[in-house]
Amino acid sequence: MKQKKRDVQQGTLALMVLKTLQVLGPLHGYGIARRIAQVSNELLSINQGTLYPVLLRLEQEKAVASEWAPSENNRRARFYRITRAGEKLLEAETRDWEQTAKLIARFVELKAEDLA
Amino acid sequence: MRVLARFFARLRNFATNRRNDDRLQEEIEQHIALQTEDNIRAGMPLDEASRRARLEFGALGSVREDYRAEESLPLIESAVQDVRYAARILRRSWGFTAIAATSLALAIGANTTIFSMMKHVLLERLEVPHADQLRLLHWHGDKKVAINSIWGIVDSGSGGLGATSFSYPAFEELRRDNRVLDDLFAFKDLGTVNATIEGNA
């Protein structure tokens, strides 16, 4: 059965971008989009174009840096890499997400007798 | 820090009117080209591959718009545009502008004149030496104070009464026993009076 595709929440995409860059090193926009699609197992429905405003924002926040470099099709592409500040941001955001996820999981599993 | 860095980056873009439209355009083209190549490698014919690539990228217009909104300070930018627009309209109908500006100037001028005159007459020109050292005396008593209702009496909170009006004997006593102030004077509005000055009533 095909699962319903999900919209991304605000800020989630930024975290995915940062994590992808941390694990895989410098990538261009298309590379990031493809990895995110792969990892999320196509469960995520984002227009790939929405990535670029997020990248710009992260760059303004100095969480990523970018430069032109030749890409695999012999054209130049803008390659993004995570900065020290980006690593720190990623760490903080990951912690936040884990906490939120744990909290929600606890509530979802709640049964009547737990509250008795 | 993050928010600040972002704000300054946007402020810089706004101030220098710098646009990265070319960069975004090149990134978009490259993105779609790479996706198309991947689609062809996956076995799609060229036109289908390119169509799918564009579809996956999403609406170009909205991406550009979001990008620009992140880039600069759209709020201030649109305010500046509004001001420019207003200036253009005003320049076009200069007759209206002239009348509006003149009446505004006259009104503001008249107001200023009247106010500064009144300020001088009513507030500043107290005919006493060292007007800046003037103090207004005020008495106040608790609930049990026995006094007739007089002009200017106020409830000074907590049930007590107070006023800046004194009976004349009280004033005289204050004046006689004064050790603190240079001098004491009292004033009262007289209502309607007839005055005769040099034979003219």
Image (spheres, rainbow, N blue to C red):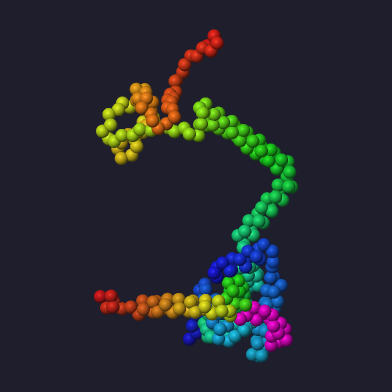
Q: Residue B70: x and y, percent?
A: 61, 68
What's the residue at 69%, 38% (across, down)?
B102
Q: Residue B145: x and y, percent?
A: 28, 31
Q: Is residue A94 above or below residue B5?
A: below
Q: Residue B4: x and y, percent?
A: 56, 67
Q: Is residue B72 above or below residue B98?
A: below
Residue B153's quadrant in the figure? top left
As drawn, which residue projects farthest toward the front? B179
What's the residue at 65%, 87% (across, down)?
B38
Residue B130 visible here: yes
The quarter of the image holding the N terminus of chain B is: bottom right
Which range of residues does the magenta coloring cover?
A66-81
Q: Residue B180: x and y, percent?
A: 40, 32
Find out whether residue A72 is within the magenta segment. yes
Q: Is residue B4 above or below residue B36?
A: above
Residue B68's quadrant in the figure? bottom right
Most prominent secondary structure in the magenta stretch?
strand
